[in-house]
Image (cartoon, rainbow, N blue to C red):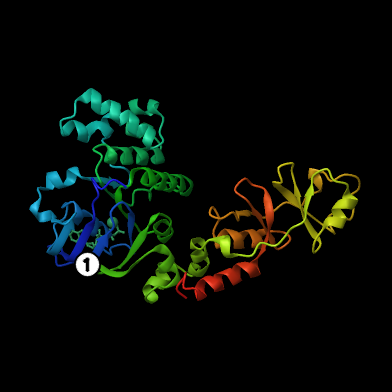
Amino acid sequence: MPTQGVRVIEFQSVTKRYADGTVAVDSLDLTIDAGRITVLVGPSGCGKTTSLRMINRMVEATSGTILVNGEDIRAQRPATLRRGIGYVIQNAGLFPHRTVIDNIATVPVLLGTKKAAARRRAEELLDTVGLPRELGKRYPAQLSGGQQQRVGVARALAADPPVLLMDEPFSAVDPVVRDDLQEELLRLQSELGKTIVFVTHDIDEAIKLGDKVAVLRVGGELAQYDTPATLLAKPVDDFVASFVGRDRGYRALGFLSAHGAEVVPLSTIPLGSPVDEARAALTGGWGVVVDENQAPLGWVSTSSLSTVEGELRSADLVAGGSLYVADSPKSGSLRTALDAALSSPSGVGIAVDSGGAVTGGVTAESVLKALDEARRSGEVPS
Ligand SMILES: Nc1ncnc2c1ncn2[C@@H]1O[C@H](COP(=O)(O)OP(=O)(O)OP(=O)(O)O)[C@@H](O)[C@H]1O
Ligand SMILES: [Mg+2]
């Protein structure tokens, strides 16, 4: 990762008291890692936006110190500081009377880049955020919510700042688009290596995006600052436990590799096999029917084959069950393995290699055993 542009951000005992006496942030100590996504999460009014805006001095701290790359931000002119910090908000905050391209090019032009060069760069940024260049000529109102949000991200990236602050950028779009935008952000981050501080009140979004997650409680106190896996496995108190949710144990499985779960042999039966052969090949009353590449097509069982004659056809198969990849080091998580076992009509989840060929099966029992072993070895705090 390039060291130039790396920006570590440090809150040292930072308090914000607004003029009316509201303490929005209370003695916050937080170190935000360079080149990572740090998520601030917590209920409405807990001081997320205030904390974020103190980083670029849109809000001035009442006491305490904020360092960016080791330098006190009060020693820097806000305009200079903000040049290195992109800012993305909900509903994108685009200028309605400027085209998409001009929206993206605004800051570089203000900073002295020639208009033609800034526009060329803006077009490249449309590619970066996954939008077709044709959209550049439109006005924000002529875009969908998700497209506007992508333009907002492109605009924040235009001056190539090492730091991006994002305040609930995806909360106004529907869940499907939101999921796309989250995936896109993870992809962008892996390519660009920005230091991203992301605010949300949605714990699922926090856990999906954050390398580390800071949970704040109302009154602006930091309740816990940890990796998503630790947050789920070991919440420090009842507030965090209830905030991360009741199914946190199940979600924690998402952070453990399924590599540890035992894969048992499964009978695989080529489509088109004689039904008699298929019956003879079943283990425990079940078998997986595969295509010529050993990819799974569905299940057959003693009872599903009881009325079938001749050769095995697609119509004879019992559908259902998710798959998981058991092909170290590309293994899926224990959660995908458990899901495969629980969703399978046979109770055995189908394990495939990264090419999609069946390698065996996994039971819920073996997933739980792997979890237990991970706990014993200290891989997850119990
Ligand atoms: N300009 C202001 N003057 C006075 N109080 C303010 C001001 N801005 C925010 N507050 C108060 O500070 C506290 C924290 O607000 P902040 O906007 O930082 O919360 P938040 O966590 O971002 O909330 P939300 O999830 O609703 O966006 C709240 O009690 C809020 O009412
Ligand atoms: Mg807010």
Q: Is residue 272 left or right of residue 86?
A: right
Ligand 2 placement by image quarter: bottom left
Q: Quadrant of residue 64?
A: bottom left
The kind of residue on which mark 1 rests is Leu
- Quarter residue 135 falls in: top left
Assess disc 1: are there few (<14), some (14-19) or many (≥20) residues with their C-alpha within 10 Å of its C-alpha: many
Q: Which residue is mark 1?
A: 28
Residue in view at x 34 percent, y 30 percent? 124
For numbered disc 1, what is the local secondary structure?
strand
Residue at 21% over, 33% down: 108
Asked whether residue 97 appears in the rendered view, the answer is no
Q: Is residue 272 above or below residue 253?
A: above
Numbered-mark total: 1
Ligand 1 neighbours mark 1 (CB distance < 8 Å):
no
Tell me what residue is drawn at x 69 percent, y 46 percent.
295
Seen in the picture, residue 198 relative to 375 is either above or below; the reply is above
Q: Position of residue 322 (x, y in %)?
A: 64, 54
Residue occupying image coordinates x 41% and y 30%: 132
Frontmost residue, 188 versus 27: 188
| Percent coordinates x, y for residue 186 in the rendering | 40, 48
Tell me if I can see residue 168 in this picture: yes
x and y percent of residue 374 in the render?
52, 70
Query: Is 275 in front, or is 263?
Result: 263
Q: What percent of the width, then of the height, locates residue 60?
A: 13, 57
Near-viewer residue (173 or 29): 29
Q: Is residue 198 above or below residue 135?
A: below
Q: Is residue 158 left or right of residue 307?
A: left
